[in-house]
Image: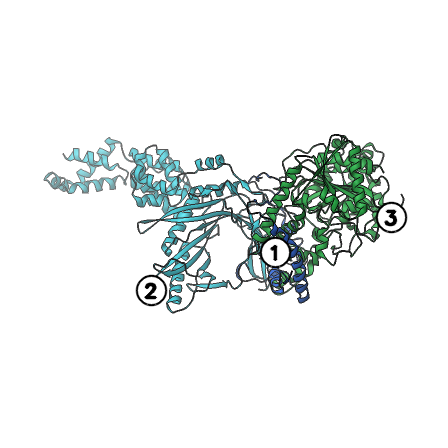
Chain colours: A blue, B cyan, C green
Amino acid sequence: MSEPKISVDVVRHVARLARLRVTDEEASALASQLSHVLDHMDELNALDVSEVPPTSHAIPLDSPFREDAVREGLSREEALAGAPLEIAGGFAVPKVLGGEG
Amino acid sequence: MTTYEAVIGLEVHAQLLTRTKLFCGCSAEYGAEPNTHVCPVCLGLPGALPVPNEKAIELAIRAGLALGCKVRTTSRFARKNYFYPDLSKNYQTSQYDEPIDEHGELVIEVDGVEKRIGITRAHLEEDAAKNVHGEGGGLHTVVDYNRAGTPLLEIVSEPDLRSAAEAEAYLKKLRDILMFIGVNDGNLEEGSFRCDANVSIRPVGQEEFGTRTELKNINSFKFVRKAIEYEIARQEAVVSSGGKIVQETRTWNEAQQKTVTMRSKEEAHDYRYFPCPDLPPIRVSEERIESIRASLPELPDAKRARYVEQLGLTPYDAGVLTGHPEIARFFEATLAALGDEKLGKKVANFIQSEVLRFVETRGLEATFPVKAEALAGLLALVEKGSINGKIAKQVFAEMVETGASAESIVESKGLAAVTDTAALEAEIQKVLDANPAQVEQYRGGKQAVFGFFVGQVMKATKGQADPKAVQEILRRLLG
Amino acid sequence: MSAPRSIVVQTAEAVRKGERTAVEVCEESLARIERHDGALNAFLYVDREGALEAARRVDEARAKGEPLGPLAGVTIAIKDNLCTRGVPTSCASKILEGWRPPYDADSVERLRAAGAVLVGKTNLDEFAMGSSTENSAFGPVKNPWDLSRVPGGSSGGSAAAVAAGLSQASLGSDTGGSVRQPGAFCGVTAVKPTYGRVSRYGLIAFASSLDQVGPFTKSVRDAARLMEVIAGHDPRDATSLEREVPRYEAACDEPAKGLRVGVVRSQVEAVEDAEVRAAMDATLDALRDAGATLVDVELPHAKYAVSVYYLVATAEASSNLARFDGVRYGLRVSRDDLVEMVEETRAQGFGPEVKRRIMLGTYALSAGYYDAFYLKAQKVRTLIRRDYDAAFEVCDVVLSPTTPTPAFEFGARTHDPLAMYLADIFTLPPSLAGLPAFSTPCGLTKGGLPVGVQLTGRPFDEATLFRASAAIEARLGLGEHEARAFLGDKA
């Protein structure tokens, strides 16, 4: 194990994707901890799984469908009960511009 | 001078006509008070889980089959991860490498030339919530989750389109088909049929694609055409002057009549797709797919061809009548109620000249007061000779106003043609008696005066006389 | 050693017969919580009013001659990652502190309908991520057998509550051992059902393809009673199985004679702790004594379970926990800019282990790494599942220790996340294979710490696990040698 698998820069990039603000100390601690864990995970490279299908659910499941019938949901009061900031019957956030981000 | 050609691919988001959302039982209806069509699932409350709407799956299959796609017997939902407040879970449940429909095509016609446009895929996904910007003194965005989770079918074309006209033709065709098969209401204004366009240019003859821009949120056919035309011209201008196209997202600004930058892709998107662990694969049997195929109605192209071949309509008339599923349905129901295919042309003419005039002023959505059976009743009166075409228009206007039947209007207003031969003959004799000079002229060989007599008779009978009967009697009395 | 009393079954019976009132039973539980939970910190919220109200309703129903449910008057504690209508549910996280769900989890709904009295919400590792409850934002839970040691995790509060008699049963959730490991550390019966057997509706997701709700009880029969109530199809969970739920209590009475027990020899021999080894030997003797046949089996890919699990579970978690952004509920750290608001809220709202796992999972899914990590892990998961298929050709249950050691001391592993993860080595393989797995107490160390044995069954075959666990319990059960002794309370 020479170079850490994950650099501080990669940590910063991933933290940005995950919307986590990390301090410098946190970033360097995470870089070393995650590298340590990922080094262990290198053991998987010993296995040839090229012919093995992935398992996303271990138990075979049916394809359950829901009938297209309206069910009562929450009242607006219930929906907004936990809202940190409510304006005009909606969930308010600092103003955003443009599309998805 | 290098000549360029445009390469255009379209992504259409069509809202599926279900009663409820894709993964929960909340109403998918448009226009409710903010945050009243919500539940733990579409609000993304901790612990809530999605269950797929069977109808949405069926409609997606229906659309796939109508677009000539291969429908997968096993498809899968995947999570598209990105943070944005209109996503209640900060991921969108969509489909990624196993979409429900793949490899379809659509045939468009531009300037009389047919062209096949490939459809790469059509996949199911949930819609996002609505962000209302500038609330709370302009400092806030307010999120309404009513729309969150509404089922969409995203239909992705191959980059086979070469002009704004082709793009427009493709969109119209796609919308027609989806409306005819009952999958989508085709409403661009309310956003239930939305289009994004990927546009790039390349020198004619070059294989590889140029850098593309993405035009987002184009909400009318007119804008699609203008936006794409503008964008092609803009890119040509940039490239011709030695510049480079920046990969970015742009939108059409109607006020400025140009496309403007929404955001550039300085930060590459990393959606971290993976199969949604809350949702097992969607398995659909071949039998089910075939039964959905069997239930597909006649598609607009086939209908148009049949109107021309079987009913003898002109291609133009056939096109008008198949412009909307409701018009086609009305036309066919009227014809069926009359029970005589040979009347197709007459029904078509009346619908185009009279019915569509009312539909235009009243809008298609309003429930049209005259049922097909009632219109058939009116046209039957014309066929029998009870009323003539001119009176029919008058009666029809009355039917639209009052909803009364053609028979009752004709009767109550005394509009029935004067078909009593004796009475008509007396009426005609009066006309002849009143115009001895013209009678002399006619008998002297001046055939043109005949028209004068007909006009006088019609005037005397307030237009109610059957013109055929009038001519017959006139000839006899003058002869 | 002997089987402990089945207090759940007995209480329901006594309440039905009118020998005890539900209110009495409830008050006893509330009094014990009052008396001991200051030391244990097993509860994050005690719903005194709600519990007494539910108990009164049971007594009124009985007075009116209405039929009583199978858990009438039984006091049950609920892990705080299961939604309870109107009752705070925080997942032991600052980001969700004070949130009151507008709905009940399916398992909670079923318990209420069966007449259970829900006394409160129990402490856990934040978002069920951990093996010691040291990751709770509201302080760790103490092991009632030794207050200097961890109760295990993540369902440490639920395990400790039952061990210390604060409630007669509890619900936990198990993603990679979060019911079985604390069950072993606290000396109680712990059940992880087959994936899909119990609805996940209302269970706040950690890793959706692994999470299962399961009960803690003093006795095997009590666990069977709870499982009969909480198992079953739920149309609100697309991964819920449409399978009939067998009579688990009847399975507890079936003799173990003829049962083929597959011993994962390599796992038993990998245990360095002599006392855990001794407890395993005693368990094998007990099973032989009960007439079971022992065969050796191997799970060649089980050793990769830690790597596979910590890729799959963190990837799913990174997506599941994205919804905590300060927009709709929970904590918001106000900022003028949206992205800063979300980043700061998550930075302050999540603890270090949760952040670590979100980071690992985000990394494993991100462009360029998906195939190398997440996809590869899902493929090795297939190999682990196949290992079990092969093992079940020759045996009916697979036996291994639940944990390599008994309960460890606070702080022993917090400095090294990987060491903490590696201790889950025995509980992870059944989770990855979706199989039912129980931890049953099978002895005490000389120092008086419980040891658990893990039994893994075929898919849907919880019944055979009840049968085998009952046989072990009859010979090695901890009897009335209760953890409450350590609380200076011999009642």
From the top left corner, tell me how far across and down residue B130 is, in percent: 55, 55
Name which residue type carries label 1: Thr
Name which residue type carries label 3: Phe
Could you tell me which residue is drawn at 45 percent across and 58 percent down? B215
| Crowding at mark 2 (Cα within 10 Å: few <14, some 14-19, many 20+) | few
Disc 2 chain ID:
B
| Crowding at mark 1 (Cα within 10 Å: few <14, some 14-19, many 20+) | many
Residue behind mark 3: C486
Please identify the quarter of the rendering in which residue B239 is found: bottom left
Q: Is residue B317 above or below residue B136?
A: above
Residue behind mark 2: B2
Badge 1 element = helix
Name which residue type carries label 2: Thr
* Visible residue check, residue B43: no
Q: Is residue C347 above or below residue C405?
A: below
From the top left corner, tell me how far across and down residue C220 is, in percent: 77, 37
Instruction: Indicate the quadrant containing the N terminus of chain C: top left, top right, bottom left or bottom right.
Output: top right
From the top left corner, tell me how far across and down residue C412 is, in percent: 78, 56
Tags 2 and 1 both on a single chain: no
